[in-house]
Amino acid sequence: MGAKKILVVEDDEVFRNTIGELLGKKYEVAQAPNGKSACELMSVQDYDLVLSDIQMPNMTGIDLLEWSAKHRPMPFIIMTGFSTLLETKSAYELGAKGFIAKPFKISQLLDLIPSIIGEEKKVVPEKKPADAYYKVSIEEFIAKPNIDFDIFIKLSETNFIKVANKSEQLPKEQIAKYKDRGIKHFYIEKEDFGKLVQFNLGLVKIMKGRSEIANDKKTSFMNYTGKVILERTFTDGVDQDSIQEASAFLKMAVETATESEDSFDLLTLLNSYSDAVYANSVAISFCSVMLAKTLGVTSMQTLFKVSMAGMFHDIGKKEIDSELLKRPRHLTTRAEQKEIESHVVRGHDILLGIKSLHSDVVRMAYEHHEDQAGLGYPNSKAARDQHPLSKILQAAVLFVEYTDTLRQSGQPITAAAVIANLQQLYEKRIDPLCLAALKKIYGVKT
Ligand SMILES: [Fe+2]
């Protein structure tokens, strides 16, 4: 049997010749400088593989793939790049068999080809499960000269493909274009995630000291960084690393929250993402710190404890079905409500396992759904038996969650409206000093 036939379709002559030459050592290679000549060649010859660029003048790689699917079906490997992210999705939908992100090493290509053309494979690139990636919001993604990680896009539940390599440049304009076209997320591999967190933490630090950066930009980015850290904690569990990241983040967050004047704007902004169960935690952490400050707490150590408890109080939710957590309360059965409420005890077990967490933080988290009337859960504990700082967290939880409820119902949200509702609904259950502090923070008179 003769060598397998590969057609290389690429408009960049130097690149095409280089690939042609290198693949030529093992395969019978033909070259086409554009889609049209590729069609002509493919009309008279079957190829075991077509290796095609996407961006080419007149007829793109996608057009060629579409033509091939209709007239002369052959296996395709598409050469992707960050600039062709959207087209890559189409290529997948049109049935391309493989993808390789430019720039690539010839060895990567040689590893990929056998799996597509059915040769004996030496190295099969292992397909990673969906949970090997972290979702990164494109909205908050900040381009920098060289990225430290590979970037993937999600094509289906189990299929992720690389569109940009480490050290590649991601132009801001390109990112803006994707945003305009409705691309919401990038994916990066878990092992690279720490770098992104570190990078964002560094940025938060720089932004904090820069007065020319608008407060909403700062807080929005800070919120994003907080959520990114929490997301990792929720999916991977809490370990020393995640606690360290959270600590570094919260130290900065505490300072910002205590410096900020427009705290309600900050909160609504923090709270404006409700797609994740843990999204509230960053807002609750900020709110707790503001409350504590207003109540006269000045010790940084105590403020830090409060912020940590705000951040991790709902960690037990990671063990509960997310569909159930999202369901409106009136559509849940009593048993399901019990299941949701179990997040407190589950969270307590998780947090107890972390040695570096101060016991006050664990206790506050455990008591975050108790209340001042002794009607809360899990223990209906009397107010006098609760940690004094727990009252702050309880008030912050009610305030942030109620703000979120109002927001979701489409009503205009003002701090005064939230406080008025809280007062009406929870007057006996919320600590009066905390309620007064909320009023003071937001300038509510009554
Ligand atoms: Fe909770």
Image (spheres, rainbow, N blue to C red):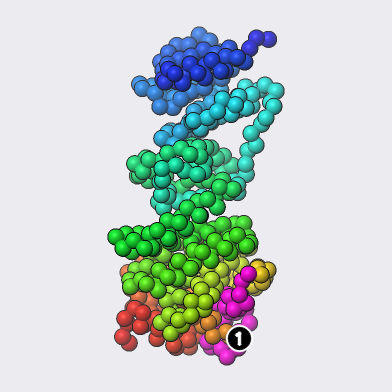
Instruction: Identify the residue at the far left of this view.
Output: 212
Magenta stretch prevailing secondary structure = loop
Packing grade of label 1 (10 A; few <14, some 14-19, many >=20) is some
Which quadrant is the C terminus positioned in?
bottom left
Relative to 61, does residue 373 appear above or below in the rendering?
below
Relative to 191, does residue 392 appear above or below in the rendering?
below
Relative to 181, does residue 285 appear above or below in the rendering?
below
Q: Closest to the observer: 67 or 17? A: 17
Looking at the rendered structure, the kind of residue marked 1 is Lys
Could you tell me residue 388's position as x and y percent?
54, 85
In this rendering, would 260 be left or right of 125?
Answer: left
Could you tell me residue 179's position as x and y percent?
37, 46
Cβ of mark 1 under 8 Å from ligand 1: the answer is no
Determine the residue positioned at 54% across, 75% down.
305
> From where the camera sits, is residue 114 visible?
yes
Determine the residue positioned at 53% across, 37% down.
161
- Bounds of the magenta span? 356-385
Q: Closest to the observer: 299 or 87? A: 299
Which quadrant is the N terminus positioned in?
top right
Could you tell me residue 47's position as x and y percent?
56, 15
Could you tell me residue 174's position as x and y percent?
37, 40
Relative to 247, does residue 162 appear above or below in the rendering?
above
Q: Closest to the observer: 252 or 387? A: 252
Residue 381 forms part of the magenta stretch = yes
**Can you tell which quarter of the image residue 439 is in?**
bottom left
Q: How many marks?
A: 1
Which residue is denoted by mark 1 in the rendering? 381
Residue 382 forms part of the magenta stretch = yes
Determine the residue positioned at 49% across, 31% down.
102
Determine the residue positioned at 57% across, 91% down.
384
Q: Which element type, helix, strand or loop, lies under badge 1?
A: loop
> From where the camera sits, is residue 35 visible?
no
